[in-house]
Amino acid sequence: MKNILFVGAHHDDLELAIGGSVKRWVEEGGQVFCATLTDSTWTGPDGTRYRDPEQVQRYCLEAARVLGYTQIDLKYGPCFTLTYSDDKVVDLLNIIRRCEVDTLVAIDQSDAHKDHRVASEVALAAARELPRVLLTRVSWHSTPEVFQSRYFVDITRQFEAKRAALQCYRDEYERVGPTWERLVQAQATLYGLQAGCTLAEGFDVVKFLH
């Protein structure tokens, strides 16, 4: 796992799902790339537009510096408009080749957020020839399918970096920061119990060749 690509729908998906693992992989000498498919803006039912795309990119670059990953913005449009297309798969294939990716991390196909599911479909279509493909969960909402963690990364020493990276997204942290804090602490504690360490992040495995 020298060159790892995470494919997310929104800026902050990486930090929520695998921020601790990314920090650890970088500390161990790996390179991590994050391809984000939307500009992270969205419009509420009352017409209110949330998040400024340029501001979100600045927040993301701050978080990337905390964790040590390289950000790649694909800017296919705002949230809730993301659709599958072969052009998007080709874009990811070009990133995989250019960055010599050997491991891809995608969002689980049953994640509660539609954008996450589409991002997963695009990522898995581009990952067919890679030797290692892992899945993670971003949304905390219940779904009919239960996410199964079969691979764990001990993030006990990297957990505070994960929290610091999440706090870089000041707009969303102001809105849902307490929920994020509950989520990442509870999730890391549960995965740590399952893995036999203090704090961990969990992944499902599509394939993992040594």
Image (tube, rainbow, N blue to C red):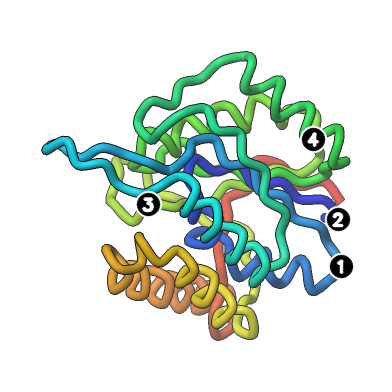
Above/below status of 12 relative to 93: below
Please state, as top left, top right, bottom left or bottom right, where the N terminus lies in the image.
bottom right
Compared across the picture, whether 3 is left or right of 165 comes to right
CA–CA distance between discs 3 and 4?
25 Å
In what element is the residue under mark 4?
helix
CA–CA distance between discs 4 and 1?
18 Å
CA–CA distance between discs 3 and 1?
29 Å
Where's residue 54, x and y in %?
Answer: 50, 48
| Residue receiving disc 1 | 29
| Residue receiving disc 3 | 139
Residue located 41% across and 77% down the image = 185
CA–CA distance between discs 1 and 2?
7 Å
Tag 4–tag 1 contact (CB < 8 Å): no
Tag 1–tag 2 contact (CB < 8 Å): yes
Q: Which amino acid, by three-letter code, is at mark 2?
A: Lys
| Residue receiving disc 2 | 2
CA–CA distance between discs 4 and 2?
13 Å
Instruction: Give the mark nearest the N terminus, 4 or 2.
Output: 2
Say few, some or many: other residues with alpha carbon within 10 Å of mark 3 (under 14 / 14 to 19 / 20 or more).
some
| Residue receiving disc 4 | 96
In what element is the residue under mark 1?
loop
Above/below status of 182 relative to 104: below
Residue located 44% across and 26% down the image = 82
In what element is the residue under mark 2?
loop
Q: Which amino acid, by three-letter code, is at mark 3?
A: Ser
